[in-house]
Image: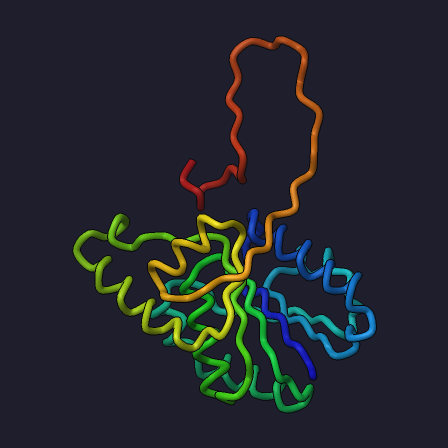
Amino acid sequence: MALLILVPSSIIGGHEFQSIEFINQIYKYEKSEISNTFIECGNKKVLNEIEFSDVNKDYFEFPQGSLFSLLSQSGFLKKHLEGIIRNKKIHKVMICGGTIESIVFYSYLIKSINKNIETIGYVPMVVDKKILRPLIGVLQNIILRLACANVDTVITINRIQAYLIKEFYNKKSLILPNVVDKLPLVNEDRGKRLVYCGRLDNIQKI
């Protein structure tokens, strides 16, 4: 059975780093199956960090944007994925998406190609749309809950997110904790400082 892993994000953030760790763990512990694992990645830097050989991984410029924006661009993407699924005899697809919208979109696309393919969504957290957009957020939550029917398995990072995924999307989750490096504490007293865990850029609006 062949596995296709999709890493569609064009940016590099915490989830993309964890996706690299996750995929490289598959490489280390499932070496007998790596010839049947294929990766499509939307970021060349992320792709270079993935330990699979060039034969098994490829760069593809995935569309970016909201769920509705992705749906409007789904034609050429579906054709691209159809070719891979047919040629590689794919039976299972894992989507490493930073948002639930990414997971449900690609799961929907895969099921529209072949409803028998198992879809796995790797997502770091739940965002309540009602908080972000009070007027339409309730409707967005309902739509995403219904759309999650196309996701066979959800993987998330901790028990809190697993609970929220169950509450919001009625899906049980497998838990895969983030890989965290242990760093020594700074003992020198340099006065006041700001400590922030995450990336600092305009996208995060920091």
Q: Position of residue 56 (x, y in %)?
A: 75, 74
> Residue 7 sits in which quadrant?
bottom right
Q: Nearer the viewer, residue 201 or 104?
A: 104
Classify residue 1 as left or right of residue 197.
right
User: Up-down: is 56 above or below 168?
Assistant: below
Tell me which residue sits at (55%, 9%) in the image. 191
Above or below residue 154? Residue 107 is: below
Query: Whole-percent x and y of residue 197?
Result: 54, 34
**The N terminus, quarter of image:** bottom right
Relative to 181, 172 lies left or right: left
State the residue in front, 132 or 166.
166
Q: Which image quarter holds the C terminus?
A: top left
Point 82% across, 69% down: residue: 31
Residue 39 locus on image (x, y percent): 67, 71
| Residue positioned most to the right | 32
Query: As displayed, is residue 186 above or below residue 104?
Result: above
Q: Residue at x 49, y 75 (%)?
A: 152
Identify the residue at the far left of this view: 135
Position of residue 187 in the picture relative to residue 174 (left or right): right
